[in-house]
Amino acid sequence: MGANSSSIAELANNSYLQHLAGTETISENDPFWNQLLSFSFTTSTNGPDTQLLEEATLSISKSLIENNPRTENFQALVKIFLSRTNELKVSAECQDQLFIWQAHNALFIIRCLLKVFVSQVSEEELQLHFTYQERPPLSYGAEAEDLLEELICTLVHLIIELPLLDITYSILLESVTTLLVLLSYQLFQKEIIRESLIYKCLMEGQCLQYTSRVVKTLLYNFIRQEKCPSPRTRIFEQTSEGSGLLYGLASGVASGLWTVLTLGGVGNKTSQQGDLSSPLANRSLLLLLVLSNLSNRPEKPNPYRQSIMSFRNTQDNTAIQSPNSYCFQINFNSLYTALYEQQKSDQATLLLYTLLHQNPNVRTYVLARTDVENLVLPILETLYCVEERNSHHVYMALIILLILTEEDSFNRSVHEVILKNITWYAERVLTEISLGSLLVLVVIRTVQYNMTRTRDKYLHTNCLAALANMSAQFRSLHQYAAQRIISLFALLSKKHNKVLEQATQSLRGPVGAEENSPVPDYAQDLNVIEEVIRMMLEIINSCLSTSLHHNPNLVYALLYKRDLFEQFRTHPSFQDVMQNLDMVISFFSYRLEQAGADLSVERVLEVIKQGAVALPKDKLKKFPELKFKYVEEEQPEEFFVPYIWSLAYNTTAELYWNPQQVQLFTMDSG
């Protein structure tokens, strides 16, 4: 490419890159560095352009890996970057763009090289690439670790200290992305990494003192959702006269310039999902999730997780009971708004889960909100659009609902919120429905989808657990929600009869089956379906025994399909829970008979409402309250680490590698 190259393909022949990767050592004081770093570049936000860039420079990167032990040019490049970051904060405040521009360019090259290093060499070998100077005996690796740690700490320091402005957006984005690249060794391991030099730098070294500020800054980047600056405000764009400010400045110190490269800036090709509108927000959130899921052990707790678990609202003036060095305060109202506005992304859903599950301050705040529908509706839409979402996003959305339904205040409040015209609900026009009834509809639909498609036992269990938690507080259930509850029971009943028939047939001997062919375990299938049926009966019973007078539509649906329950009256697994249903069906059936024949729907509901007042409460048998709590797995990182890295891999162009190289994913990454 030289000084006049015009395409990505020619980068492999660029004289500056070839010199960097060549066999000649370049002094830190050599004018070459000004020449190398004097280029204009719009950070790519789409995969194809990033892949082209990597393929074009792969041979150069491999040459550097081969020659660096002798030339130490990579270390020199890192030191050049470190030296140019000292004045960045002052430069930003003074709108002095030269330092920011060249520091950004140095970091961009470092990140591109590190990406190849991570995929080509081990972490121990990477450490060596930070120094090859002769060392005294017994000092192996010490200086390497120091320079690597200095780079990591500098990136952390930039993230927390540099103000987010149009002229600093690109270097802040590069800083976050470079940390993600360094941490991406996990992608090339099938097992979860527990010990790592890079982890040690971030969790035990000089970076430890910045833990709470890192978490706070990354959260604020997510909250702000700052879009990429328009081309006119970027530090390296040309002026109307045809020569950019920095282009001219650099011309004074460099004999040649790279051509201006534009590789998919804002407004160009479609970006990776979730990264186009605000790549800094997306990658900050990904980095936060990665950091909070690094190795966490009782004897050595993860400080980033500790910080996420303990931060408080800026309006919380109560004294801290036990001072926590990782604690900080942040505006919960802004955080809540960002969380519900971004719920269509896996990352935001995962952050919401993390905060609700691990931070009691956030959980208390969310449950106290009077506009909980803003948060719940996007979650319900995620569950409703199950075919368009990956299975893990659906699962996390469901767990969030389960956590919320553990609180009675939530279960009461959702029935007080009346919604108008839910446009994404396609099965039926819902002109007016309570949030609680809509929640019931969507969860039941998820159960039915799971029964016919995925058949995941845990999804069933969590759906029914959420319904069970809500059941005692069901209020004024919409007629359609009441119908769907009974329809789900009808579906389970039909499935039960089918499995029972198959089990009976298998005992007589399979017709036309080979002598040694395996026989399905119908007994186990029958046991599972009966557990689900019992849970549904308990949910219906819980509603009837605590709030029958509030739910005439459920009683109506129960009477309309009363024949469904006949076969379970004498079943030993259901006799106890069927007592109340039997009594309610008999009581209201008698009152309807007394009211006469050919009753209209309105008249039937009127009889039910009158009967609900007359029904003696002591006639209904009391059962223990249904309450289910979400319990995280003993080793949650076995699920979350692959999930988070799959999101990073799929939404961040700069983290694309050949899928054949990636070892971590053993799951559906969506």
Image: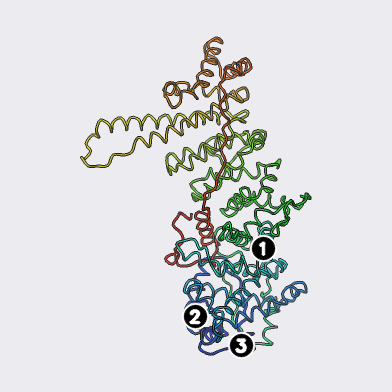
Q: Residue at x 71, y 40 (%)?
A: 370
- Secondary structure of the residue carrying tag 2 is helix
| Circle 3 crowding by C-alpha within 10 Å: few under 14, some 14–19, many from 20 | some
User: How far across and down, in percent of the image, does residue 468 sit?
Assistant: 55, 34
Disc 3 to disc 1, how far (Cα)?
Answer: 37 Å
State the residue in front, 458 or 371: 458
Look at label 3 and name its amino acid: Phe
Q: Which residue is mark 2?
A: 65
Query: Circle 1 sits on which residue?
Result: 211
Label 3, label 2: how many angstroms apart (C-alpha)? 20 Å
Q: Is residue 251 above or below residue 267?
A: below
* Foreground label between 1 and 2: 1
Amino acid at pointer 1: Thr
Residue at image mark 3: 32
Name the mark nearer the viewer: 3 or 2.
2
User: Which residue is pictured at 52% across the width and 72% down the height?
Assistant: 115
